Image (cartoon, helix red, strand yellow):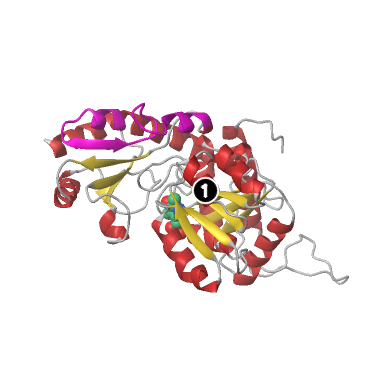
């Protein structure tokens, strides 16, 4: 594939699997778990058994690598399976540094599965470079970023933190779920690994779970991830791979339009007297707007959160008055969603009580703004 092609073209080209026997243009789904072996012991297609590799997953993984400008991609059955696979490369004595406001399940999983195995799990305010510098130690093996972060939309500097990590021989990985590769490509800023929950923008229709890791380089880490992926078996089915590759075809146009809608909604909400604060990195008032502008391309994403004046109860009530925003968890689909995040994350979460997280969809933005106007009146 000509990698000089633009993103939209690559997205279409990299997800085509021409079927030589039928000439079918749409990619077929190969459900077979096993593949025929030749009398000389070889495999004609290179495929052996579906846990290790299969045609639909191969297509998806190659496409992911192309779109993120990486060397190799690995698809998993969920975002959490992808993160766990990377954390599984850590050894006893290693130090793992996470953002204090990281995706809640990432923190809970790290502490539960790795905290007792001699891995020191620590959190830091990742948008504060001085704090990060202090927190990185000789035994730091992995610095995990999530930018913009969930649900407070804090932004951390990928280039600067990657450099700091590399100084002690650590890997820098970025949860790039929220911006998607349309708006941010961490590997181009020095990160070693980019991770996605493909359940979100890649799938795009809230009907498939998936996750992935994309590595900047082939080599020992990639080989280790491949082994973990195959041996632990947290892989997506051919149909799930097919749904994600299908989502990739419209990823750019969806993310760009949803981002435009989000920027307009954020501007409207920022001016509303009943809103205390809008967290959206595209706003000039956002404390990390400059860093976001430096590392994001063409927009600031379709996720935002608002802090409503008054109590948590007040914020919760507001979700019931919205008609076009379904109250539900998750994000990245074509439909707009709203969620009171603290009550999902639990009492230990650092999320403010009055915060509502908004995933802006593909509806007409004037309708979306009118809905908030009536709900806030
Ligand atoms: C959803 C999400 C995850 C987890 O992905 P799953 O596919 O639900 O396992 C991780 N990080 C972020 C930022 C997410 O939004």
Where is residue 317 shown, x and y percent of the image?
A: 14, 49
Quadrant of the frame with the C terminus: top left
Q: Nearer the viewer, residue 243 or 81?
A: 81
In this picture, residue 203 sits left or right of residue 277: right
Is residue 175 something one can see in this rendering?
Answer: no
Quarter of the image where one finds residue 106: bottom left
Q: Is residue 301 above or below residue 24?
A: above
Helix, strand or loop for disc 1: helix
Q: Residue at the location (20% across, 47% down)?
A: 319
Looking at the rendering, the stretch of residues picked out in magenta corresponds to 266-294
Where is residue 236 shown, x and y percent of the image?
A: 55, 62
Q: Is residue 328 above or below residue 262?
A: below
Where is residue 315 shown, x and y percent of the image?
A: 18, 47
In this picture, residue 370 sits left or right of residue 145: left
Residue that mark 1 sits on: 134
Q: Is residue 220 magenta?
A: no
Q: Residue at the location (71% across, 48% down)?
A: 217
Q: Is residue 285 magenta?
A: yes
Q: Residues within 10 Å of mark 1 (few under 14, many from 20)?
A: few
Is residue 338 something one can see in this rendering?
Answer: yes
Quarter of the image where one finds residue 309: top left
């Amino acid at each position: 594939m000509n990698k000089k092609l633009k993103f939209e073209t690559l997205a279409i080209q990299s997800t085509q699997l021409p079927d030589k026997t039928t000439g079918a243009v749409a990619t077929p789904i190969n459900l077979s778990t096993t593949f025929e072996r030749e009398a000389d012991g070889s495999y004609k297609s290179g495929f052996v058994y579906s846990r290790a590799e299969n045609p639909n997953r191969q297509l998806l993984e190659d496409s992911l690598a192309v779109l993120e400008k990486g060397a190799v991609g690995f698809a998993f059955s969920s975002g959490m399976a992808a993160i766990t696979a990377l954390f599984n490369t850590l050894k006893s004595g290693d130090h793992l540094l996470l953002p204090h406001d990281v995706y809640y399940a990432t923190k809970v999983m790290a502490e539960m599965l790795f905290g007792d195995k001699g891995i020191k799990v620590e959190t830091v305010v990742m948008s504060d470079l001085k704090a990060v510098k202090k927190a990185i130690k000789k035994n730091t093996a992995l610095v995990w970023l999530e930018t913009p972060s969930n649900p407070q939309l804090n932004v951390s500097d990928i280039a600067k933190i990657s450099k700091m990590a590399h100084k002690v021989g650590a890997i820098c990985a970025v949860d790039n779920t929220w911006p998607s590769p349309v708006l941010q490509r961490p590997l181009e800023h020095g990160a070693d690994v980019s991770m996605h929950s493909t359940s979100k923008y890649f799938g795009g229709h809230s009907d498939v779970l998936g996750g992935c890791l994309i590595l900047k380089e082939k080599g020992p880490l990639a080989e280790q991830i491949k082994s973990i992926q195959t041996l632990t078996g947290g892989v997506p089915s051919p149909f799930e791979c097919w749904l994600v590759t299908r989502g990739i075809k419209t990823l750019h146009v969806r993310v760009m339009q949803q981002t435009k809608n989000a920027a307009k909604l954020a501007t409207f909400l920022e001016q509303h007297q009943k809103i205390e604060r809008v967290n959206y990195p595209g706003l000039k008032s956002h404390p990390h707007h400059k860093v976001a502008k430096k590392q994001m391309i063409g927009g600031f994403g379709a996720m935002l959160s608002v802090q409503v004046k008054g109590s948590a109860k007040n914020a919760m009530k507001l979700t019931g008055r919205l008609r076009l925003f379904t109250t539900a968890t998750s994000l990245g689909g074509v439909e707009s969603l709203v969620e009171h995040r603290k009550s999902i994350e639990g009492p230990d979460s650092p999320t403010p009580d009055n915060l509502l997280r908004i995933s802006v969809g593909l509806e007409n933005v004037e309708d979306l703004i009118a809905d908030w106007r009536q709900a806030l009146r």
